[in-house]
Image (cartoon, helix red, strand yellow):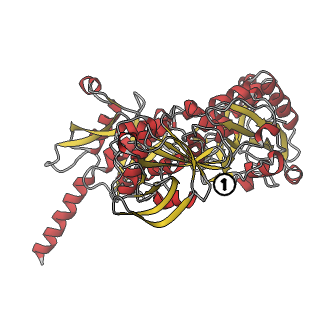
Amino acid sequence: MRAGALICVLAAALAAALAAPAAAGAPATKTPGQLLVGLSLAAPPFQAGSVRGREVVLAKGYEIDVARALARRLGLRRVRFVNEPSRERLAAAGRKVWDVALARVALTKARARAVGLSEPYLRGDQVVLLRRGLSVVRRLSALRPLELCAERGSRAADVIAGRIRPRSRALYFENVDALGRALQTGRCDAAVGDLASVGSLVRQNRSRFGPVAGRIETAVAYAVVLEKGSPLLAEVDRSLRRLAADGTLGRLAKAWLGLNPSRLPVLR
Amino acid sequence: MRLRRAAVLLLVAAWALTLAPEALPARTRELEVFFLQDGRLAPVQRRTATIAGAVRALLSGPTASERSRGLSSAVPKETPLRGLAVERRIVTVDLGARFAAGRDDVSLRARIGQLVRTVGGIPGVRAVKILVEGGVPVGLFPGYDVRRPLTPAAVRDERGPTVRELQQLLVDLGFLGQDGATGVVDDRTAVAVLAFQKWAGLPRVGVLGPPTVRALERAIRPAPVRLAPGRRLEILLDRQLALLVDGGKVVRAVHISSGAGGRTPVGSFRVYRKERYSWSVPFEVWMPWASYFSGGFAMHEYPVVPAYPASHGCVRVNRYDAQVVYGFASYGTPVDVLPVST
């Protein structure tokens, strides 16, 4: 009996020893050696996937690759994704089944009181794309005489009204396709939109537009969500800083969103 | 009674046979499999009598001879078929991860089109439910909500822009009025297309053929020949177009026909007389929406506006835009009649 118990203890120790190298030096996660990532799918190109129950069996997109790069930087070998249909619940207070979540959750003080929020991995700056035939502008004041356009209901409207203050009324369009068409045909001189919207125009129809003038900084920034008080937060912050410094975040943004924000000049 | 029951049983049996993934009625020996040709969905015949056979043929891609004829497939090579099931005439196709590989939205949409048109077009099939790696795709195929079964009717035609989209392009470029995007190719559209063809230097036929569509998709709004402030009109004799310019931007480009044999005077003028209905004494004809800019020469509506100079010297304006030109040109509005517009 005693020998049997000893064997069991030894077997358990051996199993733990075998499992340990995968997570050696890695931070404590819900499952050792694995980063469990919460998502809120149906937001390409940020994240998309194939879902069985809550398990995401196939995942792709900018935030998916950011999560994978983060796991590598944290020293975790495995990454698993779970889908949270409600984005609000993802950033609400309470216990979480996942270690981290990425779903374009913007940093706000109210959210920071409910959950742990990392340093931003992407800024919600507005990007200015010019029509063909216009030369590059590098100052906000140079945008004022131009006819501007943007997607209706987007954050661009606030930036146009509050920061650019154009001389003529800006035009607003129902979707990014209509916006692209207006810019292509010269109905407006410059389109203002978030990185993904302008990036999608640039990625698919580069020759139909002029140069990207640059980005206008905003207070919006997207952060990784963690459980409130998670000991993982400091490690995540450190890893994100490194991923930004070595150009990984910029490369992933260029690949998935069409533009590398760190390469765009800031318009002031 | 027995006979009726037997008939019902026979019908049910035939229906079940139709929907079995591996078997279809014997009369169906060939099924259509959809590939791509010039970006459009193009059917080819395959000798198979089963749904599974059709899906496998789709995943195998076009044959060498079909490829040499320009057929291709957006479905990645060696995409595995993980499973196939039929329930209530809805076919569930479970494919490997390769089916969703890549970042090209056009290619991802085309795959859905190929699969749904191939399977959904099989007699007896009501809709197609797509799974990837056994899971429900969410956001993997931009433009399609694949969480629900799709019918062939839901497949977006990748043949390029629709008539309404092309009309909207003509509106955005200034060749067509805002209310001209009707979705139907009408006479007004033909007039706008003609104006665009004149500007783009294309054959003046007024038809939305492939060269015109290609040019439209890349076109930018016409620019005025002269840089001057305020509201002005430019009559481009070489292009047979009138440009309505406001603040240095062309707000409308209008199909016109000027004087045959160079009878329209060239120079800078101003609108000095406007008449809702003007009567031409020498030619004894009504000229609606007339804006006179030099002597007896006016811009006015005329029922016949060919693609070449045909008038006695006036600027004929097509009936869809005559009122627009009349409303734009006030007393004193500058009118530049330019022989060359480049």
Residue name at image x 52 percent, y 48 percent: B174
User: Do we see residue A99 in this rendering?
Assistant: no
Q: Report in which chain the residue with disc 1 lies.
A: A
Q: Position of residue A266 (x, y in %)?
A: 81, 32
Name, please, the residue furthest toward the bottom: B1
B171 is higher (above) or lower (below) than A45? below
B36 is higher (above) or lower (below) than B320? above
Q: Position of residue A38 (x, y in %)?
A: 70, 44
Q: Position of residue B99 (x, y in %)?
A: 46, 35
Mark 1 secondary-structure assignment: loop
Q: Position of residue B189 (x, y in %)?
A: 40, 53
User: What residue sits right under mark 1 in the picture?
Assistant: A152
- Few, some or many C-alpha atoms within 10 Å of disc 1 (few <14, some 14-19, many ≥20)? some
> Viewed as shown, does residue A149 lie left or right of A115?
left
Q: Quadrant of the N terminus of chain A?
A: top right
> Viewed as shown, does residue A205 lie left or right of A134?
left
Residue name at image x 50 percent, y 38 percent: B219
A256 is higher (above) or lower (below) than A191? above
Number of labels in the image equals 1
Nearer-the-camera pick, A154 or A86: A154
Nearer-the-camera pick, B6 or A9: B6
Callout 1, which amino acid? Arg
Name, please, the residue furthest toward the left: B3
User: Do we see residue B281 in this rendering?
Assistant: yes
Nearer-the-camera pick, B332 or B67: B332
Nearer-the-camera pick, B70 or A234: B70
Residue name at image x 74 percent, y 55 percent: A89
